[in-house]
Image (tube, rainbow, N blue to C red):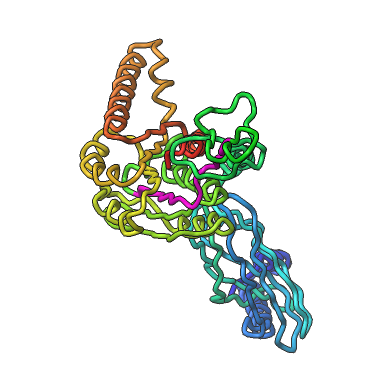
Amino acid sequence: MVITGRVPLLLLLGLLPVVLRPEASTVRLWLLVVAVLVAADLLLAPTVRSLAVQRRPIGAVRMGYDTESVLVLENAGRRHLRGVVRDAWQPTAGATGNRHRVSLSPGDRVLLRTPLRPRRRGDLRAVGVTARLRGPLGLCARQKTLDVAGTVRSLPPFESRKHLPSRLARLRELDGRAAVRVRGQGTEFDSLREYVRGDDVRSIDWRASARNRNVVVRTWQPERDRRVVLVLDTSRTSAGRVEDVPRLDSAMDAALLLAALAARAGDRIDFVAGDRRVRARLRSRGARDVAASLQDTMADLEPVIAEADWSALAGAVTQFGRQRALVVLLTPLEPSAVEEGLLPVLPSLTRHHRVVLASVRDPELERLAATRGTIDEVYDAAAAEQAMVRRRRTAELLRAVGLDVVDADAERLPPALADHYLTLKANGLL
């Protein structure tokens, strides 16, 4: 039972008879009248059981984008229903305008739409549907919370997809769809054509030229059907925030762009994520569903406050097969974590695969290093310079053992990683 604002107003209205007849019996009589009216209104109020509630499926949506929850209400009773229905969700679902006034005659149905804008990844659930049905006098209402299941799956936003068209255009130039052919060690033979001035003489096919009157050269296309293995670090270092965005989310954005690009290039995409243990694994996917599958797999991943076990992650990469692959390690370039955890297992990876480390750089270090107005800022600048020097030394150490290092801020990391992939493909290094 819930009383409405009319009950206090009705009690205040009792001041008039008390002024006219200032006795205790007048107060008691007025309170009795109000109590009787409230009790009668409660008895005449319809029950919440007469309200049939269903929720339509919502599906998946990118984090930070709008969707809506739709409730179907039906008056299954014989009395007119008036009241308020609240569609409650957990706070990170971003529900707004979730209180709906309803007025339903017997047999009527209505759709109630609640806007949602998820603020975190994963499955976000509805808390319940609370119905408050008023009595005919509007003094009180019956209220009950119904358990109506509802889930919206919030996926990584994939903001870097805006860079995909320009990288696909470069890819078309590489594979010849823009009338450009490349030659390089390890590339795949495509076709023969007549020699034109400017062609590399090393591409001349002398046997074919001997059978023709003109000199014939071989054309090559970038390698296809290669393997790209994405390894996402979900350990404590990925929980750090760069410009108020977790490093893990920025790494996911870079992985999605690279996966979408590599799948369009005809390569196979494998994915593994973990810290002390493997948290998620995805086998090779085609070009049509790779981004959607990766987003769905990444939706439930969260940073774990533990060190990464790179031996376990390297073992997961090996389980995908011994075929040479481009292995992309999406992990912060933190000197202590890299030197103690990652460096010992690198020889086993670089022996069989081409390995790239992609890291999100914090631009705040550069801003601190450049600001030296006060004594406190000088100390901050010295600490920032020391941190940047350690990062550069760690990057040089990784390059010395055969790794490619792509270190950029959160906004530039996805296109930088995609450009590095295209460069490797153009040079036949995959």
| Placement of 116 over or under 160, stated as above or below | below
Q: Which residues are magenta?
A: 217-234
Placement of 50 over or under 250, stated as above or below: below
From the top left corner, tell me how far across and down residue 309 is, in percent: 25, 50
Q: Residue at x 52, y 44 (%)?
A: 189
User: Can residue 395 be seen at all in this image of the molecule?
Assistant: yes
Q: Nearer the viewer, residue 177 or 234?
A: 177
Is 115 colored magenta in this rendering? no
Above or below 47: residue 169: above
- Residue 93 lies in what quarter of the image? bottom right
Residue sitting at x 43%, y 51% = 227
Q: Which residue corresponds to the image point at 54% horizontal and 67% vertical from the top-left?
A: 151
Quadrant of residue 430 within the rendered picture: top left
Residue 156: where, in percent of width, then height? 52, 51
Residue 111 is left or right of residue 331, and the answer is: right
- Residue placed most toward the observer, 374 or 257: 257
Residue 220: in magenta span: yes
Q: Quadrant of residue 3?
A: bottom right
